[in-house]
Image (cartoon, helix red, strand yellow):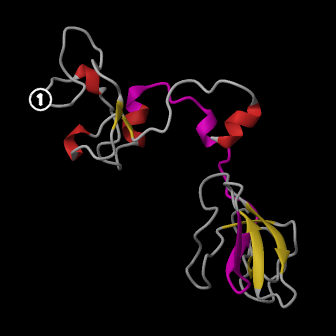
Amino acid sequence: MYTGQFVYCGQKATLATGNVLPISKIPEGTTVCNVEKNPGDRGTFARASGCNSIIIGHSEDNNKTRVRLPSGSRKTLNGDARASVGLVAAGGRTDKPVLKAGNRYHKYKCIRKRWPKVRGVAMNPVEHPHGGGNHQHIGKASTISRFKSAGKKVGLIAARRTGRLRGGKDKKDKM
């Protein structure tokens, strides 16, 4: 898209970048973004920078459409749900390193308590179950039961297994 471009929306809109059409009218293999989950909800899927979805196929009556989402999962949606043709800009945004703590501060400023992250072993015993001791170590197993009280549930909660995955690829797929 560019500044001054005309964007058309509706059943009769042409298949051009930026236009909004019902997904039943978009041919298979087309890259789309801002896909609606239900007709009229103004877009739910493929909205983040660089994301896109692909139309996989339509049912015979064009009532349902199959879409591949950015996660790789496939979803069957109502054919009347709309989508924008093309993909979202700023695809390589996360490739650039942050470099400074100040940049990270501004990045997480709107999300409270996400940054900075202080390790539990660096805290005092009154602040965290992993805190205290003469060295920065947990001092007990990091796996914890599902049925412990809320204040003790830190670390690997109800872990089925821990450690490195050993063995061939077929064993990793079963996990």
Left/right of residue 145 with respect to residue 60 in the rendered view = left
The residue under the point 73% across, 81% down is 8
10 Å crowding of disc 1: few (<14), some (14-19), many (20+): few
Left/right of residue 60 with respect to residue 138 in the rendered view = right
Identify the magenta region: 74-102
Q: Is residue 52 above or below residue 42?
A: above
Query: Is 168 in front, or is 6?
Result: 168
* The residue positioned farthest toward the left in the image shown: 126
Left/right of residue 5 with respect to residue 117 in the rendered view = right
Q: Is residue 112 above or below residue 144?
A: below
Number of numbered callouts drawn? 1
The residue under the point 59% across, 56% down is 48
Q: Quadrant of residue 82?
A: bottom right
Q: Is residue 86 above or below residue 145?
A: below
Where's residue 53, x and y in %?
73, 62
On the rendered image, what quadrant is the C terminus found in?
top right
Q: Quadrant of residue 123?
A: top left
On the rendered image, what quadrant is the N terminus found in?
bottom right
Query: Is 37 in front, or is 155?
Result: 155
Residue 77 is a magenta residue: yes
Where's residue 126, x and y in %?
12, 29
Where's residue 9, x and y in %?
71, 83
- Which structural element holds mark 1? loop
Task: List the residue tagged with mark 1.
Answer: 126
Q: Quadrant of residue 132?
A: top left
| Tag 1: amino acid | Val
